[in-house]
Image (tube, rainbow, N blue to C red):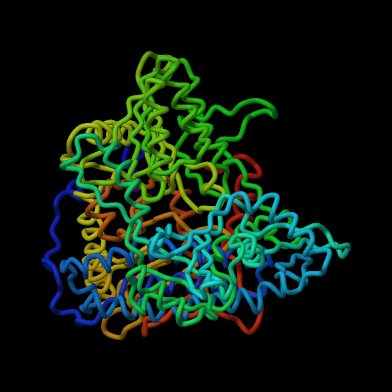
Amino acid sequence: MMDDNGHRDAIDDDLDDDWVDPVHGRDATLPEQRYLDRELSWLSFNRRVLELAEDPTVPMLERVNFLAIFANNLDEFFMVRVAGLKRRIETGIAVPTNTGRLSVDVLESIHDAAQQLQVRHAILARDVILPALRESNIEIVTMANLSKNDRAQTDELFFSTIFPVLTPLAVDPAHPFPYISGLSLNLAVRVRNPKSGDQNFARVKVPSILPRFVELRDNGNGQLRFIPLEDLIANHLGALFPGMEILDHHDFRVTRNEDLELDEDESENLIKALEAGLSRRRFGAPIRLEISDDMDPVTLSFLVRELGMEANEVYSLPGTLGLNEMFQISGLPRPDLKFPKHVPTTAAPFQAPEPNTPADLFAAMREGEVLVHHPYESFATSVQAFVEQAATDPDVLAIKQTLYRTSGDSPIVRSLITAAESGKAVLALVEIKARFDEQNNISWARQLEKAGVHVVYGLVGLKTHCKLTQVVRREKNGELAYYSHIGTGNYNPKTSRVYEDLGLFTNSNEVGAELTRLFNELSGYAIEKKFKRLLVAPRYLRAGLLKLIARETEAAIAGEPAGIRFKVNSLVDEALIDALYRASRAGVPVDVTVRGICALIPGVPGLSENIRVRSVLGRYLEHSRIYAFHDGGKHAVYIGSSDLMHRNLDRRVEVLVRLEADEHLARISRIFDLHMSESASSWILTSEGHWTRHTSDGEPLMDVQNRMMEEAEVRNRNGVQR
């Protein structure tokens, strides 16, 4: 299956050209109702996260962590997806969804499903998680169950550290209703003037600069005790409104539209336009009002009126609001209440030959391509070490890298600065439009520019989402060589510890030449020419995948072996889903493992009975994207940055690279075998469109991520595998 130069036979010279699906759009032979709604599918994903918080076999603080992740996910869903849907409805540009439903109907379904999920989430926290924490000597207390000594301590805490930070805001003819910032926790207070009898509304913002859960001194029972900041404030309202009677107080929280809209064609300076957009973001329209379920009708009516909201945008919840801030509790140093510690191994080819000596990654890459699987294999000793070695190697002439999201104190960025200061040519393609990381990326872009790095911001109208690094080095023989990395995840050391991702390190001149051209096009004007070993969006990726699917379909029709396996975060694109349906009808076995959204419906007789869909969730966030095809036994396998969503295929620069080494193909096959195994702990998507958790009456189900960690340790123990 290899040519004389050691490369796999090309599928065909025109794999990634402008191949057109012969069906030309919607396939009339397929049933009309063949997709799941993408927004409701996302809510199903978050329900799976919630089920991990509900799982009693998960360590206690990890359950708290999933509880917080669920809340954080839902906040972003409202800020972006619900906000965008509502905006399109209000501006009259909404179109029917992928299922053919009107946007207003989908929005109503979202509100119904989200209400049920949020109530389930709140009850879980109140009735299950908090009592279980108490049994583990971690208690979230309230003022009502504190002793006299404890109350004295809270008085001291309030007046010394909290009272000076608070700003009560009254609402009356002289004081208009205040601006309520997005995701802030607030107290709605009704007060009465005892002299005049007048009643007024006041708002007290719970300061986000202070810890949400205030730690109390040990009461001698060996318990860690915390009191919610809002409870502490609520019990000292008399100090904020002296001379007034406190009639009532309730918690509330507002979510706003925080999705940025930029007209890049009209913006001469993208950074300035983005900074202006970030300033406007905090004033986005309110789209969700969360309230404590004991809020009286008078206060609720007042808030709804002043915020300009609809009744179905109000979420009345039992217990504590803003449970995303439970990350403070899940981060407590109690290893006995967390997953056993996993230490990533160093990929065998990148291991140093002798202890206390640095590894030579360039030499390892000259021996052959290296596939690294994070977090099972170390980011620090692979990706980070690769960039650090390039920055200090005197024979390296140039470094080019895309940066989509990186950490606050990034060693990657520091290495690029070091390289530029030593005279190397350094290009950093910084995607400053990475949602909710815009300000961070602007900051790094300016630091890079000051150090002499050539910083560019990609192509107008497209986000640069691909994960690429290229190093140009002069070898001992005087010739230039390429050392490249193409990954599925961001160049972020912090998220690499919890995100599952793949990365290919290669010394291939073919890949190096293609990346050189791609970087030149990204710093220039457009992506025009075809690529050989890469599939590049927005122009070629969808067409390339459609052609590969069509070939498996043709093989099955001809009675030849065929097979398709995808691992993605999201599967939404209708053209690709329809192609998978046609493949299934032809008899192609299709396996899909998806973390998040899946609009495809598997197991439907006559449509998708040969398609299986699984979802694996756990301690690590499944993030790699893999596209594998039987290809007549040659096994065409691609990894890269792209999911199967419209934004990835049409509005982003994405890159997939084909794997060539037999050992890499075997490792990818193993990943799919584990994810799709009947003995694996996973969720199964049914033909009715429901996700059900796979259960077993016998032996405990296999934890896929634990198994991957164990196999990585064995693989790298002897330092021989690639």
Q: Is residue 589 visible?
A: no
User: Residue placed farthest to the front in the image?
Assistant: 195
| Residue under the image location 58 percent in, 71 percent down | 320
| Residue under the image location 33 percent in, 77 percent down | 601
In this view, the residue in front, 274 or 501, is 274
| Residue under the image location 58 percent in, 68 percent down | 244
In this view, the residue in front, 425 or 259, is 259
x then y, percent, for residue 111: 37, 77
| Residue under the image location 28 percent in, 31 percent down | 516
In the image, taking residue 212 as reference, residue 482 lies left or right, namely left
The correct choice, above or below, for 536 with respect to 477 in the image is below
Counting the numbered discs, the total is: 0
Q: Quadrant of residue 635?
A: bottom left
Q: Quadrant of residue 533?
A: top left
In this view, the residue in front, 670 or 74, is 74
x then y, percent, for residue 145: 76, 73
In the image, taking residue 343 as reference, residue 196 lies left or right, namely left
In the image, taking residue 110 as reference, residue 299 lies left or right, namely right
In the image, taking residue 137 as reference, residue 384 lies left or right, namely left
Q: Is residue 447 visible?
A: yes
x then y, percent, for residue 118: 49, 75
x then y, percent, for residue 567: 40, 61
The correct choice, above or below, for 141 with respect to 167 in the image is below
